[in-house]
């Protein structure tokens, strides 16, 4: 029986159920500890906030699984994930991997051999993160805007080697809705089946031809920044989803928000030299919540002609198919 690794053990593939494929419990940009002017990180309050939200989504909307693809260098805390999972009753999956060059913590991996990086990923998948014995169930890769740097290509290749050896899927970060096709080309050239790849943040650009080229390549596509309307209005995202479904590509779409559920570590910096207080996020992004898909997005998709069966495919079946592709 195929299984998926979560932060509290394994679950059968068919037990993943309704899944959000790209949400974060904690996020902290590299060096967040240096910001002495930032609000103090209150772990207890972050825990309470995350548990309360996930219980609400589970009880009201049937959510069963959440993938937190936080890379090593962006505030990942797998013990926090495990505690929240146990308290909320939600299955949570963590990842190994590192962020893109411009915003990641690059010094160590830039200087390590590619094979060593692949072995580090494999260790976190097969043995556990640090001394925790909490094992990653997927690999995160990331690229910057409009081009893949040599550093990012190195990390994608390391991720591909670990994915092939350990039979786990790869979820990606794309910046400004670019380089998804390049990611697929690099990963598949290194031996990863396209169906094992989920190209994240593809909804960051209003380019239906780009979206169709991703699914035509055999990869899954993430419309996973729902509610982040400072990047693109949701109405455009939803029209693009409905169009893909109408064209027969509904079996390749995964939905999520890329929300920060528990807490920001330090202050978010959404643009150079413009840190903001975390309390301001709700004003900037009032719909940026794991509830948004169920309370606003799905009703609007139904109005656009997307069937209930197609929605179930995107929320329940496709994440399991993506994980299943890694096991097949």
Image: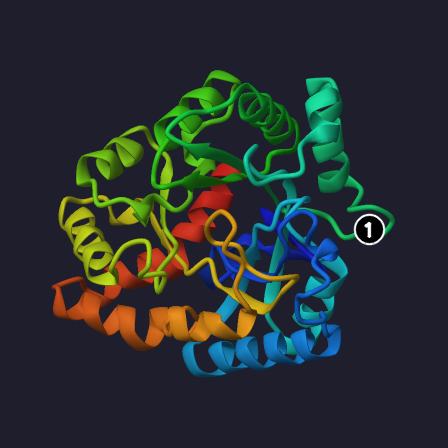
Residue 268 in sight from this viewpoint: yes
Location of residue 91 with respect to 31 vertically, above or below: below
Q: Quadrant of residue 122?
A: top right
Q: Residues within 10 Å of mark 1 (few under 14, many from 20)?
A: some
The colour scheme of the drawn protein is rainbow
Number of residue marks: 1
Residue at 80% x, 42% y: name it: 127
Q: Residue at x 59, y 55 (%)?
A: 12
Which one is in front, 295 or 321? 295
Front in this rendered view, residue 219 or 240? 240
Q: Is residue 1 visible?
A: no
Left or right: 226 in relation to 166: left
Residue 191 position within the rendered picture, expressed as x and y whole percent measured from the top left: 52, 20
- Name which residue lies at 68% across and 54% down: 32
Q: Nearer the viewer, residue 324 or 122?
A: 122
Q: Which quarter of the figure has residue 278?
A: bottom right
Up-down: is 172 above or below 66?
Answer: above
- Residue located beneath label 1 in the image: 133
Indicate left or right for 124 with 17 as reference.
right
Q: Position of residue 282 (x, y in %)?
A: 44, 74
Residue that extends furthest to the right in the rendered view of this protein: 131
Q: Position of residue 234 (x, y in %)?
A: 25, 61
Relative placement, left or right, of 188 versus 313 is right
Dot 1: element:
loop
Q: Position of residue 322 (x, y in %)?
A: 45, 44
């Amino acid at each position: 029986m195929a299984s998926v690794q979560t932060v509290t053990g394994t679950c059968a593939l068919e037990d993943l159920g309704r899944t959000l494929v790209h949400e974060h419990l904690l996020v902290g940009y590299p060096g967040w500890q240096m910001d002495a002017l930032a609000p103090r990180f209150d772990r207890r309050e972050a825990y309470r906030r995350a548990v309360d939200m996930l219980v609400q989504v589970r009880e009201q909307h049937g959510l069963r699984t959440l993938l937190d693809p936080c890379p090593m260098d962006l505030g990942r805390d797998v013990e926090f994930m495990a505690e929240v999972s146990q308290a909320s009753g939600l299955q949570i999956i963590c990842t190994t991997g590192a962020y893109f060059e411009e915003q990641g913590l690059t010094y160590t991996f830039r200087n390590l051999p590619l094979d060593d990086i692949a072995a580090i990923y494999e260790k976190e998948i097969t043995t556990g993160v640090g001394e925790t014995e909490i094992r990653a169930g997927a690999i995160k890769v990331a690229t910057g805007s409009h081009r893949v740097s040599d550093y990012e290509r190195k990390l994608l290749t390391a991720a591909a080697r670990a994915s092939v050896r350990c039979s786990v899927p790869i979820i990606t970060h794309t910046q400004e809705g670019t380089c998804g096709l390049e990611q697929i080309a690099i990963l598949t050239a290194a031996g990863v089946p396209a169906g094992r790849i989920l190209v994240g943040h593809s909804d960051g650009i209003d380019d239906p031809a780009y979206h169709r080229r991703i699914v035509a390549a055999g990869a899954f596509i993430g419309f996973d920044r729902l509610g982040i309307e400072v990047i693109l209005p949701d109405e455009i995202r939803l029209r693009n989803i409905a169009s893909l479904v109408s064209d027969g590509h509904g079996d390749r779409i995964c939905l999520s928000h890329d929300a920060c559920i528990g807490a920001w570590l330090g202050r978010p910096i959404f643009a150079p030299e413009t840190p903001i207080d975390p309390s301001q996020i709700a004003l900037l992004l009032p719909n940026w919540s794991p509830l948004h898909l169920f309370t606003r997005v799905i009703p609007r998709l139904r109005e656009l002609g997307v069937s209930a069966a197609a929605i179930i495919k995107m929320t329940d079946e496709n994440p399991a198919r993506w994980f299943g592709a890694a096991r097949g």
